[in-house]
Image: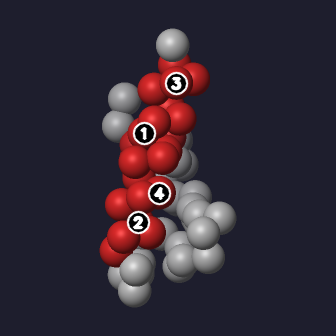
Amino acid sequence: MKVSDLFRYETDSQTVRVCSCLGDRCNASVSRAPFVNRLAAVVALFLYVIYSL
């Protein structure tokens, strides 16, 4: 499953607005803190792996 599949429906072409809780901008806009983006991605991946076990 791709990440984009989580936010799209086959019958609906409108995407869902996704924002993080870290205070950066929504929908993958350019952030001024790339370290925060990488940290958030690593934490999200870790939580996904832990909860999928």
Label 2, residues with CA under 10 Å away: few <14, some 14-19, many ≥20: some
What's the residue type where badge 2 is placed?
Asn
Dot 3 falls on a residue whose secondary structure is helix
Q: Which three-letter amino acid code belongs to the residue tagged 4?
A: Ala
Q: Amino acid at mark 3?
A: Ile
Along the line of sight, the residue nearer the viewer: 33 or 24: 33
Is residue 41 among the parts visible in the rendering? yes
Q: Which residue is mark 3?
A: 50
Identify which residue is drawn at 44% across, 69% down.
36
Which residue is under mark 2? Answer: 37
Work out how far the residue at label 3 is from the one at label 2, CA to CA, in angstroms: 20 Å
Q: CA distance from mark 1 to mark 2?
A: 12 Å
- Mark 4 and mark 2 residues within 8 Å of each other at the beta carbon: yes
Q: Earlier in the sequence, mark 1 or mark 2?
A: 2
Q: Position of residue 52 (x, y in %)?
A: 51, 19
State if disc 2 and disc 1 touch (CB < 8 Å). Answer: no
Identify the residue under disc 4: 40
| Label 2 residue SS | helix
Q: Is residue 19 above or below residue 50?
A: below
Q: Residue furthest right?
A: 21
Locate residue 26, reporting x and y percent.
53, 73
CA gap, disc 1 to disc 4? 8 Å
Task: Name the residue located 40 percent from the left edge and 80 percent from the top edge.
Answer: 33
Mark 4: secondary structure: helix
Q: Earlier in the sequence, mark 3 or mark 1?
A: 1
Q: Which residue is mark 1?
A: 45
